[in-house]
């Protein structure tokens, strides 16, 4: 979640365009590390959480697949 002088927003991944879409949100509060979003997001939206410092509205986004975790040796 980010904010400027007028509103809070997140970047949502547009799966059809493979682009970031800046989306205004409203909050009712923050509880520890959880933000309660009351408007602006729809069920199924994918909120981008990595690379936010370089992200702009309309930027091309590549979804990275996490590398498999290495299991500890017995």
Image: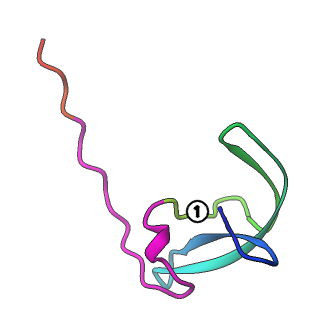
User: How far across and down, in percent of the image, does residue 22 sit?
Assistant: 64, 79
How is colour applied across the structure in the image? rainbow
Q: Residue tagged by mark 1?
A: 47
User: Dot 1 lies on which element?
Assistant: loop
Q: Residue at x 43, y 67 (%)?
A: 51
As for residue 62 lying within the magenta part, the answer is yes
SS assignment for the magenta stretch, majority:
loop
From the viewer's perspective, is residue 18 above or below residue 32?
below
Q: How many marks?
A: 1
Image quadrant holding the C terminus, namely top left
**Residue occupying the far front of the picture:** 5
In the rendered view, does 10 fall on the left or right side of 73?
A: right
Q: Residue at x 72, y 75 (%)?
A: 4
Establish if 30 lies above or below 62: above
The residue furthest top is: 74
Observer-nearest of 54 and 18: 54
Locate the N terminus and report the quarter of the image it occupies: bottom right
Q: Is residue 27 magenta?
A: no
Q: Position of residue 52 (x, y in %)?
A: 49, 68
Note whether 74 is above or below 23 in the view shown.
above
Q: Residue at x 31, y 57 (%)?
A: 65
Magenta residues, start to end: 50-69
x, y percent for residue 8: 75, 69
Left or right, residue 64 beside residue 20: left
Which residue sits furthest left?
73
**Mark 1 crowdedness (10 Å alpha carbons): few <14, some 14-19, many ≥20:** some
């Amino acid at each position: 979640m980010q904010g400027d002088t007028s509103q809070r927003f997140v970047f949502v991944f547009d799966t059809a365009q493979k682009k970031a879409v800046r989306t205004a949100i409203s909050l009712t509060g923050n509880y520890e590390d959880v933000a309660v979003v009351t408007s602006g997001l729809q069920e199924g939206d994918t909120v981008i959480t990595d690379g936010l410092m370089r992200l702009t509205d309309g930027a091309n986004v590549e979804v990275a697949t996490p590398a498999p975790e290495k299991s500890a040796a017995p």
